[in-house]
Every structure is written in structure tokens, then in C-alpha cells.
């Protein structure tokens, strides 16, 4: 029963994450990246506060923050503030299919950063995975003109890659955090919101021209990219007896996302984007494959 619920939660999270690239583009048609970050963060914080209330965790908020305030301040400035602001700007400059695919290489970035900052060993297959994934990024960014290295938006590509560094850095900082993960994410939003409001006021863009469709889109982003979906994913991992089975569901997300981008907003998916995405996913799969009889037996024992 728990395994069935875990798969249900996992599939729900993957399907919701598959829609966010489309939601990003719809939202950015009316909001600036800073405005989008501000409203989506507020929506996420409200949703996570409600979840914590129903789970009886609200009393952990103040004690968790005061136990290490500078640490949670740093986490909040990295994610959601810097990470999503840079990611939204990348989506603003690039086709959503390109920005999403490049951002998907964050797991490879995490491997490299973990070696530098946590002293973890990089295995041979990790280097092979890096080669596949970053070659895929180049294929996507240049639309196949690999030798010419002509980028439609060099800044957009740089920001998409920078977002992977920030996301990986955030999880490295979180590696030894023993606090409840939902509380930790909620604290990040509560820290970021005042800064986001300040940046949006400094930007000085008008809010009057935003339609109902725009407000619904940004609310959707806040709920299902930055809020509730994270809790669904955590619940799936907590319930399952086979973490790998749940984790592998995420590989379907970018391909579903490309279909939604093409059908809902009519974005033209360049063939090289699909090729590059397959290369990135190949790298991620290589990184996860367990070689040798000993590891295979261990995997079967876990199952």
C-alpha cells in the first residue's frame, strides 16, 4: 500500500514539474523575472505554511531558524532568491525548451561541486557522464553548430548554467542539515520574500497591466514549481522501499515538458534540443547505473 502511494506521489510530482516550463513562459509574458519571483515566493510560502500547520510543524519554525540564523539567511539568499531570479531570466532570454534542458544538467554539476567542497571522489563513470551531459548542453546552446559555437543568447545560456551551480551549491550546503526539509524550504522563502519585494520596488515596473491569466500563471508556478510539488516528492521518497525506482521517474519530466511546450504555447522544438536533452539524460543514467555483480546483488537485496 505504501509503495503504491509512493509511486502515486512521485508520478504526481513529475507530472506537475513537467508543466512548469510552460507556466514559466506564460508568466514571463506579463511579469518581469523579479515580479514573478516575488509573487511566486509569497504563494509558495503561504502553501508551505498551510502544510506545516496541518502537519503540526509550525512550532519548529522559530527554533530551527534561531538555531543557526546566518546559515538559513544564506540558504534563502541562494534559493529561492538568486536561483529562481537567474533561472527566470534565463527562461526570459531563451526558448523554454533550451533553458529547461540546460538546467537539467544540475545533477552533473552537483557531482563536480561535491568533489571540490565535500571531498567526494569522482568515479570514472562520473567523468563519462559529465562528457555526455555537457556535450548535450553545447549541442542545445549552439543548435548543433558545435564547431562554430554560435549562441542565440550567450547571456541566457550562461545564466542557465549559473542556475545549475546555485542549485547544486544549495544542496551541498544542505547536505548536513538535520532540520525538517519542509521547514528548511519554508524558511528559505520567508528569508527571500523581503529581499524580493525590495528588488521589485527598486525595479519600479507597473503591476497594473497584468491580466487574470498572468496572476493565475504565477500562482501556479508558486504552488507547483516552488511549493507543494516539493512536499509530494519528499513524501514519495519517504514512503518508498525503493528510492531508485522513484528517483528514475524524474527522467520522464523533460520529455513531457517538451510536448507541453509544443502543444500549449506552440513553441518550436529545435531537433538539436531533443538530441542534446537525450545526451544529458544519458549522462545522468550512466551516473546512476551500478556495475558489477556485488553492486547488483546489493541492489536486489535493497529491493
Image (cartoon, rainbow, N blue to C red):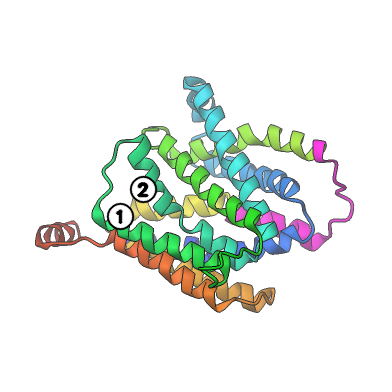
Q: Which quadrant would residue 134 be assigned to in this image? A: bottom left
The residue beneath circle 1 is: 126
Q: Please provide the residue range marked out in magenta.
A: 202-225
The residue at the point 59 percent across, 61 percent down is: 99
Say if 110 sits above or below 68 in the image. Answer: below
- Residue 248 horizontal side relative to residue 213, left or right: left
Disc 2 + disc 1, Cβ < 8 Å = yes
Q: Tag 1, which secondary structure? A: helix
The residue beneath circle 2 is: 111
The residue at the point 59 percent across, 52 percent down is: 158
Say if 48 sits above or below 99 in the image. Answer: above
The residue at the point 44 percent across, 41 percent down is: 171
Q: Is the magenta stretch mostly helix, strand or loop?
A: helix
- Residue 4 horizontal side relative to residue 267, left or right: left
Q: Which quadrant would residue 180 be assigned to in this image? A: top left
The residues tagged by marks 2 and 1 sit, at their Cα atoms, a distance apart of 8 Å
- Residue 150 coordinates in the image, percent (x, y): 60, 65
Q: How crowded is mark 2: few (under 14 residues within 10 Å), some or many (20 or more)?
A: many
Q: How crowded is mark 1: few (under 14 residues within 10 Å), some or many (20 or more)?
A: some
Q: Does the magenta stretch include residue 213?
A: yes
Say if 160 sits above or below 203 in the image. Answer: below
Taking depth in this image into account, of 63 and 222 the one nearest to the observer is 222
- Residue 289 horizontal side relative to residue 147, left or right: left
- Residue 133 coordinates in the image, percent (x, y): 41, 61
Q: From the image, which quarter does the N terminus lie in? A: bottom left
In this orientation, does residue 133 appear? yes
The residue at the point 65 percent across, 62 percent down is: 94
In this orientation, does residue 56 appear? no
> Which comes sooner in the sequence, label 2 or label 1?
2
- Residue 266 coordinates in the image, percent (x, y): 68, 77
Amino acid at each position: 500500500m505504501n509503495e503504491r502511494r509512493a509511486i502515486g506521489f512521485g508520478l504526481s510530482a513529475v507530472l506537475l514539474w513537467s508543466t512548469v516550463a510552460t507556466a514559466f513562459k506564460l508568466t514571463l509574458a506579463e511579469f518581469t523575472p523579479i515580479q514573478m519571483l516575488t509573487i511566486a515566493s509569497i504563494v509558495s510560502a503561504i502553501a508551505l505554511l498551510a502544510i506545516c500547520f496541518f502537519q503540526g510543524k509550525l512550532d519548529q519554525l522559530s527554533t530551527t531558524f534561531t538555531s543557526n540564523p546566518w546559515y538559513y539567511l544564506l540558504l534563502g539568499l541562494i534559493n529561492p532568491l538568486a536561483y529562481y531570479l537567474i533561472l527566470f531570466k534565463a527562461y526570459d532570454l531563451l526558448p523554454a525548451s533550451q533553458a529547461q534542458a540546460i538546467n537539467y544538467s544540475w545533477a552533473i554539476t552537483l557531482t563536480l561541486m561535491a568533489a571540490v567542497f565535500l571531498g567526494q571522489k569522482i568515479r570514472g563513470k562520473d567523468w563519462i557522464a559529465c562528457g555526455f551531459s555537457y556535450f548535450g548542453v553545447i549541442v542545445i546552446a549552439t543548435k548543433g553548430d558545435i564547431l562554430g559555437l554560435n549562441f542565440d543568447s550567450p547571456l541566457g545560456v550562461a545564466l542557465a548554467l549559473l542556475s545549475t551551480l546555485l542549485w547544486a551549491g544549495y544542496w551541498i550546503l544542505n547536505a548536513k542539515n538535520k532540520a525538517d526539509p519542509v521547514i528548511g524550504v519554508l524558511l528559505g522563502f520567508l528569508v527571500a520574500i523581503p529581499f524580493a519585494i525590495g528588488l521589485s520596488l527598486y525595479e519600479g515596473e507597473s503591476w497594473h497591466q497584468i491580466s487574470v491569466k498572468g496572476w493565475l500563471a504565477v500562482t501556479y508556478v508558486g504552488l507547483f514549481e516552488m511549493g507543494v510539488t516539493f512536499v509530494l516528492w519528499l513524501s514519495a521518497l519517504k514512503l518508498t522501499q525503493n528510492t531508485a525506482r522513484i528517483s528514475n521517474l524524474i527522467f520522464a519530466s523533460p520529455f513531457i515538458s517538451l510536448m507541453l511546450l509544443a502543444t500549449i504555447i506552440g513553441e518550436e522544438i529545435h531537433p538539436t534540443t531533443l538530441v542534446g536533452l537525450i545526451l544529458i539524460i544519458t549522462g545522468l543514467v550512466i551516473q546512476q547505473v551500478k556495475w558489477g555483480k556485488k553492486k547488483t546483488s546489493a541492489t536486489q537485496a535493497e529491493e
